Amino acid sequence: MTALKYGKFEMPEKIKSEEVSSTFARFVVEPFERGIGHTIGTALRRIMLTSLEAPAIVSVRIEGVPHEYMAIEGIVQDMTHIVLNLKCALLRRLSLQEGEHPREIKLLTTSLDITDEMIEKGGGSYKVTLKDLLRDSGYELVNPDHHIFTVTKPMTRRVDLRIGNGRGYVASERQTGFETQVDEIVIDSAFSPVRLVNYYVENTRVGQDTDYDRLILEVTTDGRVTPVEALNFASQILILHFQAFESLKAHVLSFDRGEVSVNRDREEILQKLALRINEIELSVRSTNCLENASIETIGELVVMPEIEMLRFRNFGKKSLTEIKQKLDDLGLSLGMDLGKYGINRDNIKQVIAAYLQEKAGSSEV
């Protein structure tokens, strides 16, 4: 098998996460070669919306209720409304027990005992929530207080719920993998934990070129997986499917890792390191603190460890957060290791001075 040498592809060094919560996150990934941003954004979006798995309720059986088109004595909602409420139950479970199949459907039984005291305490009714039906189920309840039905008379009823893992949306008539019991009502299940994925591609700079791609992904989930997990799972699913094309490999591609561009990378980072502190628009308080510490350039700032910054007089966490954000915007951080460029804390001032002198000399020519 012959080897072919390919030129360098610009690749992201890290993924920047913004506004991260349990249900929403914005990811910024750069740089990509022109056109790659749309290719990757489209693929990740489609996989996240169609191929991620999560638990959902697939059937319900309430003792004494033969079908879903009936009212239940002592319960405000009819069975149709109860089924609709069960469809909105959000369950989370990522790890399986040893020997457990990922598509195994579990039958969970709860004896629901509603007493006079519980009804009186609720002002004449008791609201049955998801946590009443799935206590000790082994699942994490994303919305444990989700209302299922309201009881107005004391009762003791057995409630059976079947829970399974799946993908996408599965209608009740397409549910498989179990035999229904008498009076069991099979329901539609929304397994997909991702609600919305938007992606945008913008231009970004690499050296002097400005036509590279910056990929921005906005991921919204329902809480059964986090946005970070959704992106991670989707990338692994894509990698799995691309492995099917390994059998077609006629040549091994060897990619240039960019050794020839080290000088260009060094030039690019020196441009940032040579910036003076007053050029990045810090607050007056932060600027004064850095001046008192005799830090004049960005280079002198980034070689300082974060813990040492806090030792400066009148320098607090608010100033530290502001500085870290400004450096992050430049693709830099506190305590950076610049060893591959031959730069360290001891020679940073000399390197910047030599760079500025060289730059001034070349501009005069």
Image (cartoon, rainbow, N blue to C red):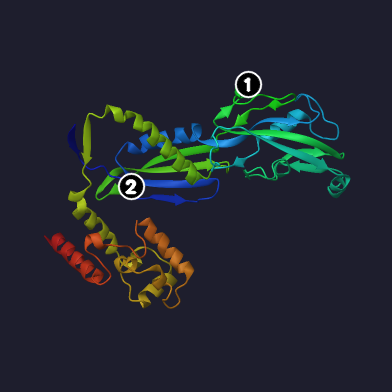
Query: In terms of image quadrants, where is residue 248?
Result: top left
Could you tell me which residue is drawn at 79 percent across and 33 percent down? Answer: 77
Which residue is identified by label 2? 12
The three-letter code of the residue at mark 2 reads: Pro
Which residue is identified by label 1? 173
Give the percent coordinates (x, y) of residue 93.
57, 42
Tell me if mark 2 has few (under 14), some (14-19) or many (20+) residues whose alpha carbon lies within 10 angstroms of its own. few
Furthest residue to the left?
365
Give the percent coordinates (x, y) of residue 16.
41, 51
Give the percent coordinates (x, y) of residue 320.
44, 67
Most foreground residue, 225 or 292: 225
Against 32, residue 361 (above or below) is: below
State the CA–CA distance, disc 1 to disc 2: 45 Å
Against 14, residue 1 (above or below) is: above
Most foreground residue, 298 or 135: 135
Give the percent coordinates (x, y) of residue 260.
17, 49
Q: Nearer the viewer, mark 1 or mark 2?
A: 1
Could you tell me which residue is drawn at 35 percent across and 57 percent down? Answer: 330
Would you say the residues marked 1 and 2 are in contact, meaning their CB atoms lie under 8 Å apart?
no
Q: What element carries label 2?
A: loop
Mark closest to the chain's N terminus, 1 or 2: 2
Furthest residue to the front?
99
Tell me if mark 1 has few (under 14), some (14-19) or many (20+) residues whose alpha carbon lies within 10 angstroms of its own. few
Furthest residue to the top?
173
The three-letter code of the residue at mark 1 reads: Glu
Query: In terms of image quadrants, where is residue 106?
Result: top right
Left or right relative to 36: residue 358: left
* Picture mark count: 2
Could you tell me which residue is drawn at 88 percent across and 45 percent down? Answer: 116
